[in-house]
Image (cartoon, rainbow, N blue to C red):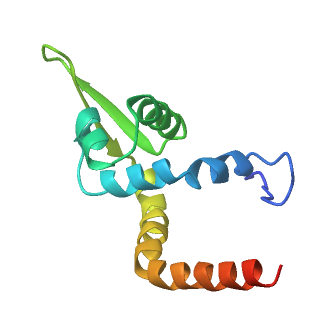
Amino acid sequence: MRQQYDVYAMRCPTRMVLDRIADKWALLLLDRLAEEPMRFNRLRRDIEGLSQKVLSQTLKRLERDGLVFREAFATVPVTVEYSLTPLGRTLNETASALAHWAERNMDEILQAQAAYDRKTSGGS
């Protein structure tokens, strides 16, 4: 029998997973890796503002969660590629939709922010 999880319960382990996938770097990595397997330095170049340390930490967490696969090739120096696992592919549909939703709706969001700022700063 499968265990029942409740995302609204404070100690439910799903909260950790939601925290992980709500991270902007994780979303961007999942979306980028959906295209093809990639090496570490290419990911770092492709995702502007992502430091080497944060990239390494995020990839390790995604690998631990079973979302990313790390494959090392016996070359000199060792070549390492990252790709999505089958589980990661199921999540990527949602992650990609969320990331690209932000792109499609950014103008409206900026307008709403400006209207809110005008409203809250003008009345005080």
Q: Residue furthest top?
A: 76
Considering only vertical position in the picture, is 78 above or below 69? above
Nearer the observer, 27 or 34: 27
Residue 69, quarter of picture: top left
> Is 10 positioned to the left or the right of 28 in the image?
right
Considering only vertical position in the picture, is 102 above or below 40? below
Residue 93, quarter of picture: bottom left
Considering only vertical position in the picture, is 78 above or below 10? above
Residue 124 percent location from the top left of the image: 83, 78
Residue 18 percent location from the top left of the image: 65, 54
Q: Residue furthest right?
A: 10
Q: Residue at x 86, y 55 (%)?
A: 9
Q: Residue at x 47, y 34 (%)?
A: 54
> Is 2 positioned to the left or the right of 114 in the image?
right
Q: Residue at x 16, y 15 (%)?
A: 77
Residue 100 percent location from the top left of the image: 41, 72
Residue 114 percent location from the top left of the image: 59, 81
> Is 111 positioned to the left or the right of 104 in the image?
right
Nearer the observer, 48 or 62: 48
